[in-house]
Image: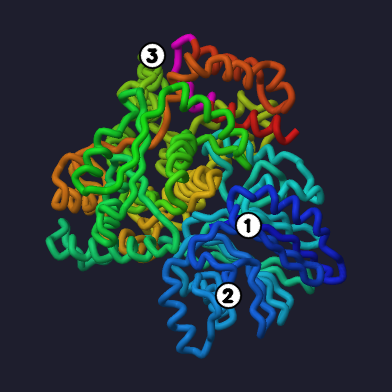
Amino acid sequence: MCGICGIVCSDSNRQVDHSVLDLMSKSLLHRGPDSHDSWYGRGIGFSHRRLTILDVTSASNQPMVDNQTGVVITYNGEIYNYIEIRKKLTNKGHTFTSTGDTEVLLKAYIEWKYDLLMQVNGMFAFSIYDPRDDTVFFARDPFGQKPLFYYYYEEGVIFSSELNSLLENKTIPRDLDKEAISEYLLYDTFVQPNTPIKNVKKLEAGHAIILNRENNKLKKWRYYDPINTEDKSYGSIPKERDYNDLEDVLLGSVKRHLRSDVPLGVYLSGGIDSTLITLLASDVLGANNIHTFSVGSTVKSYDESATSNKTASILGTQHHNIVLSPDECLSTIIPLIDRLDEPLSDPGFLAISQVAKFASEHVKVVLSGDGGDELFYGYPPFYKWNTANNLDNIPSWILKKALKPLVDAFPDQYGYMGFLYKLKIFSRGLGYRKEIRNSRWIGSFMPEEIITLMMHGNRLDSLNKEKYGLEEIYKHVLNIHKNGMNNNEIQALGYEYQQSFLPNIICNHTDKANMLFSLEARSPLLDLEVAKYANSIPVNWKVNSGKGKYILREYLNKRLGPYVSNKSKQGFTVPLALWFKNELREYCTDVLSYESLKKSGLFNIEYVQKILNDHLNGKSNNFKKIWTLIVLTNWLNRLN
């Protein structure tokens, strides 16, 4: 795993400014502190920061050039099936001078060109320059585990692994994209392909681009779509052979993800997914060879360390656990958001950063449980969906005019996902189109609130109620549902999570949090074979008996008993709602002060301060709204 960046001029007679590319590369030092190099051709320059994982010798340094063809690659990520691909290429006559996956990816391009994307199984973002036809090929992995930002303009393309690095290039105007900002307030992230900066884009997960330098034209296409392909031969309930099949698929993925030439470990939070990964990794390597890591909290409702400690003890892993005091947690928050390259207001970023910092003292690679909730339907919306459907049979005017005000009248709770807090969130999705129900459940602000929050909000296309209605801001998620029309409602929700929440929130915060500490995080549940399997099994193998991830729970119950398999879903997060009222009170009021907010000129300051004061005074738990605004305001102030 590494950091990549580059400058590609459509005019090959132009010279790339080495000092500018160096600045862009230096901004990525944390992503790859082990080695650095750059390559320059006619009107083109690639730079690379390397974190050595596979083949720690200089033979796998990048950018890498093929001596026969002159093809050049700069690449971030891991190809987990590189050994199998290498064998195919060797049989076709290719020779290798290194033992890592970079040369395999380079030779795969030379052999199959763009069809290499049908061969690789991994997480990646790369750029390949082919002097034979003067094209540049960019691609990003199927679920967006590795990022790629780019600026396409009349003189070529500038790209990087991070937005901060890209903006070191002063060619790029820093004009804010207010339409994208309105989406951020709804989704807690800048949904691909958008960023806070106009005309700066993220390459979407499962997409590729070819730049033809001769005419400076971009061609973009989608090469991967996790559409459900349910196998009708499966029974209504998993049988013993089905659990064997599950184990075979998961074990194959874990074996591939354990390929490493440096020490590795596993995040063990106490939940279904991390316990499953730890168990299977122990099967492969032996538990005594596995380092596991967990971080506990002194706030009881947020602490899972008792369960993770029990799992580590039963399996016999080399377990590392720390319980952070509020002061220790709080001391990391401000430095962490100061290092975010783009606004991302999911609090999971903070929790993962804390365990990543801890783990990086021991290993260079960790396995995580990302993907389990999206592929095996673990989030509460999956098993609360039918309840919402039943309530939606009540006329919408009753839901909106009577039931919701009644729910809002209840006092708020500030611990982890209290019943009344969840009830208020649940009520936000009632009486609306099913395609946008989940977005109303999980977002910080509702469109009707964003209109008031943003200065001249009703002038934005995304929020212009008279012109578009309130659905324009939901176009991202509506398009996803349109593409997955053949699914039933629960499958459609799963498709939404895989296409939106997974790349935009989960993979995003995992990459950012771990790379801050030069740590590679791998997600065996996002292996293509696992995804193919998960999207082929019946819905009731996932949602059953009022819980998600049914087949995973039952498998764990067979292996370890019910102490983990019966656990309710708990997110990996931190107690911001409580901290904002106490330890972080001064910080909140400072970042969201009149003077601070006036700098951006984006927000209705009185409305923001009402949101903050209602939380501080115990009137309403607005922690998600406050955190979303803090992260964005902090980033805007640093930009300026």
Left or right side of 18 for 487: left
88 and 204: which is toward the camera: 88
Q: Residues within 10 Å of mark 2 (few under 14, many from 20)?
A: many
| Residue 475 visible here | no
Query: Which residues make up the magenta segment?
Result: 617-626
- Point out residue 114 in the picture as x, y percentages from the top left corner: 57, 75
554 and 84: which is toward the camera: 84
Q: Three-letter amino acid code at disc 3? A: Ala
Left or right side of 68 for 94: left
Q: Residues within 10 Å of mark 3 (few under 14, many from 20)?
A: few
The span from disc 2 to disc 3 (Cα, nearest Å) is 61 Å
Q: Residues within 10 Å of mark 1 (few under 14, many from 20)?
A: many
Numbered label attached to residue 106: 2
Q: Residue at x 45, y 77 (%)?
A: 85
The span from disc 3 to disc 1 (Cα, nearest Å) is 53 Å
Q: Three-letter amino acid code at disc 2? A: Leu
Callout 1: helix, strand or loop?
strand
Q: Which residue is mark 1?
A: 49
Q: Earlier in the sequence, mark 3 or mark 1?
A: 1
- Picture layout, residue 67 above or below residue 607: below
Left or right side of 460 for 630: left
Q: Residue at x 73, y 46 (%)?
A: 167
Q: Quadrant of residue 339?
A: top right
